[in-house]
Image: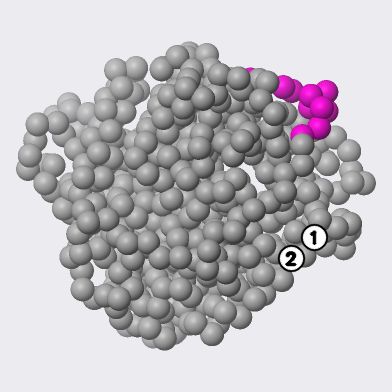
Amino acid sequence: MQMANSNIVDFPLPPAQENFDLNLVADVLVIGGGPAGAWAGLAAARAGARVVVAEKGYLGTSGTQAAAGTGAYYIKPDDPVHREGMVNSRLPIAFGFAETDWIEKVYDQSFINQDLMSRWGYAFPRTQDGNQERWGGLRAADAVQFLRHQLEKHGVTILDHSPALELLLADGAAAGATGWNRRTGKRWQVRAGAVVLATGGTAFRSGIAGGNNNTGDGYLLAVEAGAQLSGMEFSGQYGIVPKGSACSKTAVYGSATLTDAHGQVVSRGKGTTIAEIQTGHVFCKLDKYDDIGRERIQAGQPMTFQYFKRHLPIDPFTQEYEVEHILEGTIRASGGIEVGDGATTTVPGLFAAGDTTSREKLVGANQSGAGPATAWALASGSWAGHSATLFARKYGGDAATRKVAYAGTAGLRPTERARADLDVKALIAGVQDETLPVAKFYRRDGKAMSSALDKLDGLWRDARASLAGDSGLRGADYARSVVRAREAAAMIAAARWIFASAIERKESRGLQRRSDYPVIDDKQYSHVITGGLDQVWVKRKPVSGSAHLHARAS
């Protein structure tokens, strides 16, 4: 494993303009159309920028927010008691990485954004006394769909079903991207003064609701351009679901009786996870809800209870059913692209927002959950869009004419002859073998991780040398084969960065749980930064002086 940043790639020149079916020029290109991407596009457009948003699915219905819905934390203005409570509530479980000033900025911005939504006409639910209920009020797909309408009103160009497959660089700065439309098979290029990555995290296609498109694409795009990641070891986040379901809403199980295969009552969280690993089964009954609680939880978590109505026809409040753990990964954890003030990355002109970024300064080494994660999406999206607009005005005025180079590597531009026998499904299965099993990925062992990393390095070498789209296909079929190849490469890369970081952190802290280093070690109190393509590197970075080390045990 290399210990310094040697992320150097020879970038070939892009093909001629006529090789693209769609050529666009923008001040700001946003890649990803969840809440973070939508807010990035809105912030840029409201500041007067020409904006293009490229979304892998359909903006308004794709992604984990649209599939499940969740509330967004915020701080009430001029309410010091509420402010103190919101800032301090999660510090004890942040394990020393959260920063109070960062938390305040995020939750203040979250309030501003939700207030704007209210002013624009978004119908937040109301409590019995008639007040808006914002926490818990961003109801599933309608919130992101509402933001889509706002983007359209502001003249933003939306490219649906159009994943970005590689970034364009000009003199080391982000200068746009290219991709394919998966439905039409048309190839597109956007030259831009600045780029925002908002592609979400990854659960390695575990089956989590809305997570199929979250394959770590943003990580690969960022590192290919020269950015770095932080906290990728904090990724072993699992959610509880009814066995065979996909909607992991931990809040549902706050008033439940949970038992292992032997009938012993276990606690939610670590208790249920260990119970599944050790006994093979976990069972649940939602028997601690009163009548009002039943009404509220069903209204607040409709996806979970739809499963009971359509697929498991029982009364979960009186009847026992089996649950299991499903990987939520970096979608609900805290690792990702390292960003600074204004959602900047280490690459000029490249900004990042939402689940694709590190959230360590907000939630520390623990899971980002629901409320904090959504607040972060709203806040970081706004900051990224604003920062990208300012950068484009100052440096990106010649976006249409700059000499650009492609940054894409594995899955897109093989170094050797493409191999027809290199099966994308087999590559993804190889990654999932190392990342999905709760018995392997929840509590980690150094020797097992080293073995996994060796395997993943081999998969990367194969992908780098010989993985590409199926040249025997045409049109949309070919476009989808290119996208699948690129997704496989991104998942391999993400897993390598996770395991390299987890091997480097020789302790158990938050979501980093090691059987061979089971306690917190103060000597390990630093960020683990990673990157690199053909050779993964890791390095240490001091934790900010404004972080607060509260917890002393994992």
Q: In this view, does 359 lie above or below 538?
A: above
Residue 161 versus residue 266: which sits nearer the camera?
161
**What is the magenta range?**
14-25
Which of the 4 quarters of the picture holds residue 490?
Answer: bottom right
Is residue 250 left or right of 291 when viewed as pictured?
Answer: right
* Residue 140 seen anywhere in this rendered image of the structure: no
* Quarter occupied by the N terminus: bottom right
Specify the amino acid type for callout 1. Ala
User: Which residue sits at x=60%, y=76%?
Assistant: 452
Residue 71 versus residue 429: which sits nearer the camera?
429
Residue 203 versus residue 192: which sits nearer the camera?
192
User: Which residue sits at x=51%, y=34%?
Assistant: 349
* Quarter occupied by the C terminus: bottom left
Is residue 377 left or right of 280 when viewed as pictured?
Answer: left
Spot the residue most to the front.
171
Q: Is residue 404 above or below residue 419?
A: above
- Asked whether 341 falls inside the magenta stretch, the response is no
Is residue 440 left or right of 484 when viewed as pictured?
Answer: left
Residue 57 percent across, percent down from the top left: 61, 36
Do the residues bearing badges 2 and 1 touch, measured as CB atoms within 8 Å? yes
Residue 528: image tag: none
Residue 12 percent across, percent down from the top left: 77, 42
Which residue, given by chain and number where applicable, does mark 1 sit on?
465
- Asked whether 23 falls inside the magenta stretch, the response is yes
Label 2 crowd (10 A; few <14 / some 14-19 / many >=20): some
Circle 1 SS class: helix
Which residue, given by chain and number where applicable, does mark 2 sit on?
461
Label 1 crowd (10 A; few <14 / some 14-19 / many >=20): some
Q: Is residue 215 above or below residue 258?
A: above
User: Which residue sits at x=41%, y=30%?
Assistant: 387
Residue 53 percent across, percent down from the top left: 56, 28
Specify the amino acid type for callout 2. Arg
